[in-house]
Amino acid sequence: MRVVRVNRSKRANHFGTICEKRMARKRRFNLERASWHDARFGNGTPVEIKSTMLEHSNGQPGNFKVYREYHEKLRRHDGWYCFVVYRPHGRSGLTIVKDKMIRACDLPLLQWHGGGDHRGTQQAKIPIRDIF
């Protein structure tokens, strides 16, 4: 019998969905699937939920990936980011280590670079230490 291990980075969507659901309960968001945000506050303000692993299997710290087009739209709508750092355990579990809300207009200076074909926009990676 051969055991196939799934790399945790390939399970990022799974972990991200868990984080979204937990933050929606904790922060009282209404989850909403849109290209540029994940949820809304009760008053309609958009919220983008960004999550990352505390540390990857190679020992590197996680980072948050932000897409320029969506970031600019979130700023225009006075939106917020909910940043979540988690530690995976087992195949599908996770522990949320910390979370923080930041207005999109209050993010630290972003260094944009080409995003390739992914989502057709530039992207920026934000280290955990720049948020917390």
Image: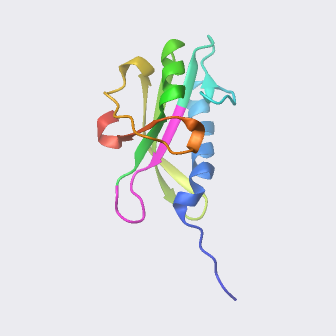
Residue drawn 50% across the image and 50% down it = 95
- Of 64 and 83, the residue lying toward us: 64
> Looking at this rendering, what residue extends furthest in the bottom direction?
1
- The x, y position of residue 51, in whole percent, is 49, 42
- Can you say whether 49 is above or below 78 in the image? below
How many numbered marks appear? 0
Direction top: furthest residue? 43
State which region is magenta.
49-60
Which of the colour schemes (rainbow, by chain, secondary structure, one colour) is used? rainbow
Instruction: Describe residue 98's horizontal placement relative to residue 41 as left or right.
Output: left
- Decide which of 98, 31 is in the foreground and name it: 31
Would you say residue 48 sits in the magenta stretch? no
Q: Position of residue 63 (x, y in %)?
A: 40, 45
Residue 20 drawn at (x, y percent): 59, 37
Residue 80 placed where, x, y %? Answer: 49, 21
Q: Nearer the viewer, residue 98 or 74?
A: 74
Q: Quadrant of the N terminus?
A: bottom right
Q: Is residue 10 visible?
A: yes
User: Which of the 4 image quarters holds residue 7?
Assistant: bottom right
Q: Is residue 98 above or below residue 106?
A: below
Residue 59 in the magenta stretch? The answer is yes
